[in-house]
Each structure stands twice: as C-alpha cells, then as structure tokens.
Amino acid sequence: MIEQRYLNDAEFAKAYTQTKFNTSPSGPVKIKRELAQLQIAPDLIEDVIAAISHEDQLEKAGKFVNRKQMETNRRSATEVQQRIQQTLMQRGFSFDIISEAILTFWENEDEDVELSACLTQAEKLNRKFSGYAPYERKQRMKMQLRRKGFPYEVIDRALERLAEQES
C-alpha cells in the first residue's frame, strides 16, 4: 500500500487540511489539534498548517464577522464583538487573526442602530423592574444595559426616549 502511495501521511494531512479549512468553519489551531489526534507527525502538521495563508485565514474570519454583525440590531456592538471573538477562538483562529478581522471587516454602523438596540433592551428591563421605585428602576436598568456593553451616552439617550414614550 505504501508503494502504491495509498498510505502517505503527508498527502493525507495536506488533503485533510485543505478540505477542513475550505468546507468547515475550522481554523488552523483546530485543524492542527485534529491532525494530532489522527497521529500525524508534528513536523508534517506544522508544514501543512503553514500552507494556510494569512490572507485566507483573515478572509474566512472576516466573512464570519460580516455575517454576525447583523446581530447588532438586538445587542450592543461590544457584546457582538465579544461573541465573535469567542466563537472564532473556539473554531481555531488565533487572537491576531481575530483582532485583525474585526478591525478590517467590522463596519461602523450608525449610532441609531445601537440606540435602537439599547432602547429595545431598555423596554424589556423596564417591564422586568416595574415593581421598583422610579429612581431604583432607572439605576438597575443602567447597570444591566452597561453589562450588556452599551456605552453610557447611548444608555442615557435610550432612557430619555423611554421616559418620553411613557409620558
């Protein structure tokens, strides 16, 4: 089988890496781990992982960033970026690639989008904390919205709008 080249770890590792990278959400770190579990020699693993270009990794991570950015209509930009980082880390991308992808592909949206998301969350929290006195309700809402990653300026504007809607 070896003479017929049916058993060739180098070719297998190369084909496995290309297939995994092109057809699944796996990054180089995850593929490296999988190849090690398949008992491929460490030097072969390093060679095939090095063949994945920086640009290809960045492009793949960037596509994910663009797709996930659409969630900012329900969540703060900070929270969405943290979720993107966490997911890409789990998928096997390095922190450098993730950071560069977010810087490169994250499109700064209008403040209105984040304000709208904050207002939606504030309305939910207003119902949740309806049993509290107005001052305490407002403080609890501010604290929860800040935990969700909204900037203070956006929180204040959202709470002002909510107060206007209620009166």
Image (spheres, helix red, strand yellow):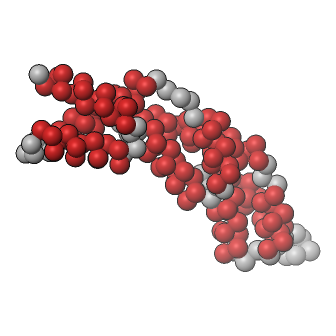
Residue at image location 68% in from the left, 49% down from the top: 97
Nearest to the observer: residue 5 or residue 113: 113
Residue at image location 28% in from the left, 42% down from the top: 142
Q: Eyeballing the image, is 20 above or below 163? A: below
Most extreme residue toward the front, as rendered? 135
Q: Is residue 27 visible?
A: no
* Quadrant in the picture for residue 45: bottom right
Question: Looking at the image, how many numbered discs can be counted on the residues?
Answer: 0
Relative to residue 123, is residue 76 drawn left or right? right
Query: In x, y percent, where is residue 78?
Result: 46, 42
Nearest to the observer: residue 48 or residue 54: 54
Query: In x, y percent, where is residue 101?
Result: 64, 42
Query: In x, y percent, where is residue 137?
Result: 16, 42
Relative to residue 87, is residue 158 drawn left or right? left
* Quadrant in the picture for residue 115: top left
Residue at image location 70% in from the left, 73% down from the top: 36
Q: Eyeballing the image, is 158 above or below 13? A: above
Q: Is residue 142 visible?
A: yes
Relative to residue 50, is residue 109 drawn left or right? left
Relative to residue 19, is residue 82 drawn left or right? left
Q: Quadrant of the C terminus?
A: top left
Nearest to the observer: residue 7 or residue 23: 23
Query: In x, y percent, where is residue 39?
Result: 72, 77
* Quadrant in the picture for residue 62: top right
Q: Eyeballing the image, is 113 above or below 102? A: above
Q: Quadrant of the N terminus?
A: bottom right
Residue at image location 57% in from the left, 52% down from the top: 88
Most extreme residue toward the right, as rendered? 3
Q: Eyeballing the image, is 62 above or below 28? A: above
